[in-house]
Amino acid sequence: MGARQFCTPHILANGEATMLQRISLDEKRFDESWFQRVLLENPSLLPVDEIEPLFGPLTPLVREMPTSAGSVDVVYINAEGYLTLVETKLWRNPEARRQVVAQIIDYATAISKWSYEDLCAAGRKAGLTGEDPVAAAVAEEAEFDRARFVDTVSRGLKRGRFLLLIVGDGIQEGVEHLAATLARSPHLGFSLALVELALFRGVGTDSDLLIQPRTLARTREVVRAVVELKAGVSADDVTITL
C-alpha cells in the first residue's frame, strides 16, 4: 500500500482562498515531548468518535506512565472508565516504524495484569497526586458514579479492553503487517488505530498552526460467542462465554 497524501488545505477569508504550507516536524522545536504535550492538552485532536466511540470523550490522565514494558507516552480515560493508550512517533527513525505496533501491544499486555490500585500507583509515579488520582480526573463529570467507574476500569484492565492509538506525522507504514503483530495477543480485547497528524501554517507567515488529524487504519472488533450445552439440564444451565 502506498503512502496516502494530504490535499493541500486552504483558508477562505474575505472571499479569498489562501494556501497553507505543510510544516515538517523535522524542525527541532517539534520533538516528541512537544507532540505529547499538544495531545495531552488537546484530546479533541484524536478522532475517537470515528474509531471507537465507547472510549470518548477523552479526559487527559497522564504522560509517560511507567509499565514493566516501558512508559506509555500519553494516557486518557473517560467518565465511563475506559482507557486509551497513545504512542507518539515522529518517523525520523526507520526502526521505530517496525517496532511501534509491537511496542504499544507490549504496554497493553503489561497493564492488563494490573489491578485498579496498580493503575493509581503508576499514575502517581508519573506525577499524579491524591489517593485515587484516576477517579479524580473525571470525578467532576455529571452523574459520576465512582463504584461503577472503578468496576469498569478493573474489568477493562483484566480483559485488556483498551483503545491503542499510534499517532505520528506522515505515517507511511502499510497496514498489511498489522495482522501478524496483533495475533501475538489474542487474549486481549483492545482496539488499535493509526492516526496521522499534519501541521500547516499560512504561506509566508508564522501564525497559529492548523492541525489536521486523519485515521489511516483501525482494527475491527469481532465478537465471538461460545455456547456450552449440557445434556439433560435446563436452559438455566446454558453458559455463554464472550
Image (cartoon, rainbow, N blue to C red):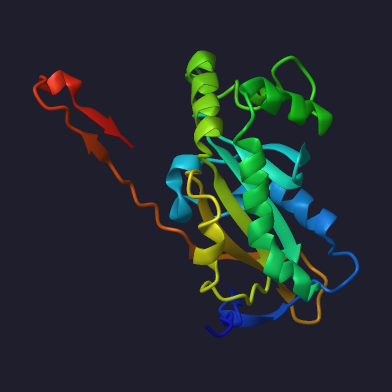
Please provide percent x and percent y for residue 77. 59, 35
Q: Residue at x 16, y 19 (%)?
A: 236
Near-viewer residue (158 or 15): 158
Up/down of 120 relative to 36, above or below: above
Q: Is residue 125 left or right of residue 182?
A: right
Task: Name the residue nearer the viewer: 64 or 104.
Answer: 104
* Residue 120 placement: quadrant: top right
Compared across the picture, whether 11 is left or right of 56 comes to: right
Spot the residue most to the right. 28
Q: Position of residue 177 (x, y in %)?
A: 55, 71
Q: Residue at x 47, y 54 (%)?
A: 51
Residue 17, how many percent across, how many down?
60, 81
Asked if residue 80 lies left or right of residue 228, the reply is right
Residue 193 against residue 93 in the figure, above or below: above
- State which quadrant residue 140 falls in: top right
User: Where is residue 71, by image quadrant?
Assistant: top right
Q: Nearer the viewer, residue 242 or 166?
A: 242
Q: Residue furthest front?
A: 231
Residue lying at the far bottom in this picture: please name it.
2
Residue at image point 87% right, 72% down: 27
- Residue 86, visible in the rendered structure: yes
Between 118 and 75, the one nearer to me in the picture: 118
Quarter holding the C terminus is: top left
Q: Is residue 41 visible?
A: no
225 versus 49 height, above or below:
above
Question: Is 99 placed left or right of 51 in the picture?
Answer: right
Picture residue at 60% right of the left edge, 81% below the top: 16
Total marks shown come to 0
Query: Where residue 103 appears, x then y in whole percent?
Result: 69, 55
